[in-house]
Every structure is written in C-alpha cells, then in structure tokens.
Image (tube, rainbow, N blue to C red):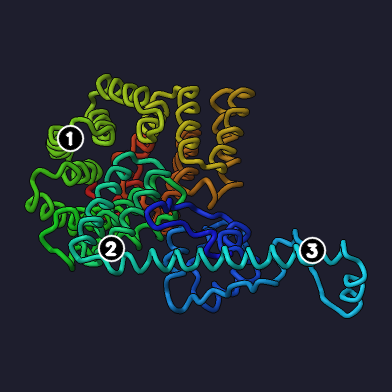
C-alpha cells in the first residue's frame, strides 16, 4: 500500500527508479495504474533520450512530493482488493462455499482466520495513514523559527553531500535541499544549493544534460529572485549561462557579480577559472584557481581542475602528480580519472587510457560506456592501437545516443588520424548542443585539429576566440 512505501520525511533518501515496474512497486500498484497517473495526473516520469520507447525513470523525492499534491488522489486498495502482485489467491464468497464452510469446522476456522488477518491488515494500514498525517501536521504546527532552524540544518547536510561529488551523494543533496525548501519556501540558499547540485548531477550521473540544466536554471533564477545579494545564486546562474547557453559574456558578468558579493567564495573563483581556461585566458585562469585553492585547500575538485589548468599551461609533471595523489586518496572521485585518460590519449599511452576510461565509467555506473570499453580492450589485445580505436569507433556507433555521442566519435577519429571525419562529427555535436563542446578550445584530445580551417569555424560557431 502507498503509505507503507513512504518513509518519514527526515529519513527519505532520494533514489532513481529505472522502470515502470519499480515505479509501480514504489506505490504498491500495478504498472497499468501508474502509467495512467502519468497521462491523467502528471506523474513526474522521464524518458532517457536514445533508449527504447518503454524506458522510463523517476526520482523517489519527486514521487513523494507529487503524492502531497491534491491532484494526485492516489486510489487506496480496499481491504478485500486482490493484491497487485498476484501472489495471494482470490477469495470469492458464494452460497455453495458458505454452506460447505458451515458443515466443515476446519474450513470455517480457515475463513475466520483469513477475515481476522484482513481486519488486522486494515487496522495497521489505518494506523500508518494516521501516523503520516500526524507527522505532516507536526511540521505544519512548527513555528516559523523552528522551520527556519530545521531548514538551515538540512541545507548544511545538503552542502556536505554536494561537496563529495558522487552520484549517490548528489542525489542525497537534492533531497536535503528540497526538504529545506519545504520547511522554508523563502530560503534562497536552498534554491542555490539545488541549482548547484543539478549542475553537477549531469556530470556525475546519467541525468540528461537538458533536464539538469533546465532544473538548475529555474532554481538559480528563484534564488536570485529571493535574494539578489546571494553570491551562490549568481555563481550557479553563471555556470548555466556558460556551459549550457554558451553565453560567455553573460556568464562572466554573473561570475564577477558573485565574486563581488563574496570574494571569499572558493566555488565562484573555481568555476570562473574553468570558464577562463575554456576561452583561452590561461593566465587569468591560473590566478582564479590559485585563489580558490587558498580559500579551500582541502577541496579535491579544485585540486583536480587546477591540475588540468597546469597541464594546459605546460606544467605537466606537477599536474600528473596532483592527479595521481587525488586518485589514490579519493578513489571514488571521477575527475582525476577523466583528466588522466585525456593525458594518456595525448601521449598515446593506450593501456593507461583504457584503464582510466574504464574507472571513469565504473564510477558513473554507465553500463553502455563499459560495454564500449570492453570492445576497445578486445580490439587492443588483438590489434594494438589501430585495433583499439577501430573497435572503439565501431562500438561507439552501435551505442550512439546511449553511452556515446558524436563528440566521442570525433575523438576516436582523431586517434585514427581522420581529421575531416572528426570535424564533421564535432559539427553534429554542436547542432545537438552537447555541453562538452564549449570546452573544445582547450581539449587536449582535439589538439591535432588546431591547424584545420574546419576547427576554426567550430570555434567561431561557439563564440570562442580563435587560437
């Protein structure tokens, strides 16, 4: 039953449900019912691009919030409704059965026992429903001061989970920030935290880019609306403008506004540094990333991006040392493996490239990417570097839209020294608005294309300065 699947608010942990069957199980109903709820009652269900028509997913926190809306009006099974699982036998009362039971004491005892179980189950369901209502009423009766205090505590928990930068921790951060907003709808920092989290979820999980950036933009705009003096809100908005809208001028304006409001915000300096790197302002990027490191010397995220800026600036040995240290001390952090794979690509260290690319896919829980890497590993074992990249390319094409994109095809074509094919795929990637494209100017994997006229045209389309 529905109330048996919903936990107390303080113990909710956001989960992703990856099929109609899992969503139906969450509600305790059959698949047909939840499909109808999506059509008739706007149940928040999503369809991943490029997957089978029936592929869907949903987040438990959103399903729980949907239940709280008046329009949800979820049907409750009656005490004698047949369970949706089909595991229990269906009992039908008729004259013949009643007469037989009356003559058979043993049968009569069985019927009475079944009736007693039904009564007890109904009583337990009623108790849980009343308890859920009691919890809701308790939150409603809290004073504004109590709500603000609990919202602040939830916000801090969200920031802690956000700082860990894993798929699991970021989903928990979404839940904490959402709960904080429920307690205090005017809490601008919680909206900014939600925006920051969606900005990272697309990088550290399989949440589609368009969906993540749309949610982030709306949360950031709400935060600015509530408190225009909040540095975190302008910082999140700057991130969206740069990486999704490719608005370098607007993004820089928002980054500068965020730093003006709070010069001690390490994340504002950090993200501003990355955008400066991508537009070719290496010296400015070094200044900003160093400022971020001074403000938060324990951040592995800042350290990894600083290593990337150092590598792009020609300081290779120090960059590699930093990345290896992070990979060793924080084995669940994705960024060092991404950068180490890129560096291995440039140096044509194919064994290291496959190792780091595999680790990155494992941390992302990306099964399609792992299948591609397995094919590449087999190709490498059979045919060396050429075998690796031909196998990689073939596998990427078969998983296009699911585990691979035209950008990935372009990288493989670069490895095979097919520059025009690489540029054609990068043009398609721009047409499809892949966020990764805003970073192609400093992408070390694409350095072999820098002298090509077609690459210059790509930079112009993105609004990036020429090389």
Crowding around mark 3 (Cα neighbors within 10 Å: few <14, some 14 to 19, many 20+) is few
Residue visible at 44% across and 65% down in the picture = 132
Q: Earlier in the sequence, mark 3 or mark 2?
A: 3
Is 232 left, or right, of 393 in this rendering?
left
Q: Residue beneath label 2, please?
A: 183
The image quadrant of residue 4 is bottom right
Please name whichever residue, 123 or 215, is drawn nearer the observer in this view of the structure.
123
Crowding around mark 2 (Cα neighbors within 10 Å: few <14, some 14 to 19, many 20+) is many
Figure check: 12 above or below 319: below
Is 69 left, or right, of 253 in this rendering?
right
Q: Are marks 1 and 2 in contact (CB under 8 Å)?
A: no
Residue visible at 59% across and 38% down in the picture = 371
Q: Earlier in the sequence, mark 3 or mark 1?
A: 3
Is 272 left, or right, of 412 in this rendering?
left
Q: Residue beneath label 3, please?
A: 89
Is 329 left, or right, of 224 in this rendering?
right
| Structural distance between the alpha carbons of marks 1 and 2 | 30 Å
Q: Which mark is in front, 3 or 1?
A: 3
Crowding around mark 1 (Cα neighbors within 10 Å: few <14, some 14 to 19, many 20+) is some
Please name whichever residue, 176 or 417, is drawn nearer the observer in this view of the structure.
176
| Structural distance between the alpha carbons of marks 3 and 2 | 44 Å
Residue 211 locus on image (x, y percent): 41, 60
Q: Earlier in the sequence, mark 1 or mark 2?
A: 2
Please name whichever residue, 410 or 333, is drawn nearer the observer in this view of the structure.
333
Q: Which mark is residue 296?
A: 1
Residue visible at 65% across and 66% down in the picture = 30
Figure check: 312 above or below 109: above
Q: Secondary structure at mark 1?
A: loop
């Amino acid at each position: 039953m529905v109330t048996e699947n919903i936990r107390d608010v303080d113990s909710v942990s956001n989960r992703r449900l990856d099929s109609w069957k899992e969503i139906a199980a969450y509600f305790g109903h059959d698949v047909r019912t939840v499909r109808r709820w999506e059509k008739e009652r706007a149940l928040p269900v999503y369809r991943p691009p490029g997957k089978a028509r029936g592929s869907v997913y949903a987040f438990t926190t959103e399903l729980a919030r949907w239940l709280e809306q008046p329009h949800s009006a979820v049907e409750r099974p009656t005490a004698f409704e047949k369970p949706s699982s089909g595991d229990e036998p269906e009992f039908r009362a008729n004259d013949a059965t009643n007469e037989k039971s009356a003559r058979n004491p043993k049968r009569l005892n069985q019927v009475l026992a079944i009736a007693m179980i039904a009564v007890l189950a109904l009583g337990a369901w009623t108790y849980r429903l009343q308890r859920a209502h009691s919890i809701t009423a308790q939150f409603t009766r809290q004073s504004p001061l109590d709500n603000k205090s609990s919202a602040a505590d939830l916000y801090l928990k969200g920031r802690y989970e956000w700082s860990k930068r894993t798929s699991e921790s970021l989903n928990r951060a979404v839940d904490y920030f959402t709960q904080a907003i429920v307690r205090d709808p005017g809490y601008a920092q919680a909206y900014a935290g939600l925006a920051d989290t969606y900005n990272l979820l697309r990088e550290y999980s399989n949440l589609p880019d368009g969906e993540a950036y749309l949610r982030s933009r709306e949360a950031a705009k709400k935060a600015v609306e509530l408190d225009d003096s909040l540095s975190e809100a302008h910082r999140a908005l700057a991130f969206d403008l740069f990486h999704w809208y490719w608005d370098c001028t607007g993004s820089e304006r928002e980054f500068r506004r965020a730093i003006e409001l709070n010069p001690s915000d390490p994340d504002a300096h950090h993200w501003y540094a990355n955008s400066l790197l991508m537009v070719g302002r290496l010296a400015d990027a070094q200044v900003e990333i160093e400022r971020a490191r001074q403000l938060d010397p324990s951040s592995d995220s800042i350290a990894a991006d600083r290593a990337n800026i150092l590598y792009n600036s020609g300081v290779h040995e120090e960059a590699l040392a930093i990345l290896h240290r992070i990979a060793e001390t924080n084995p669940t952090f994705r960024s060092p493996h991404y950068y180490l794979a890129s560096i291995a690509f440039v140096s044509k260290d194919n064994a290291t490239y496959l190792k780091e690319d595999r680790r990155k896919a494992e941390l992302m829980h990306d099964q399609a990417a792992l299948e591609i890497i397995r094919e590449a590993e087999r190709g490498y074992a059979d045919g060396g570097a050429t075998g690796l990249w031909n196998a990689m390319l073939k596998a990427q094409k078969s998983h296009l839209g699911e585990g691979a994109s035209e950008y990935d095809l372009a990288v493989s074509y670069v490895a095979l020294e097919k520059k025009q094919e690489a540029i054609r795929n990068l043009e398609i990637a721009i047409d499809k608005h892949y966020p990764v494209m805003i970073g192609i100017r400093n992408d070390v994997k694409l350095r072999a294309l820098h002298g090509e006229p077609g690459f210059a045209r790509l930079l112009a389309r993105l609004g990036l300065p020429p090389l």
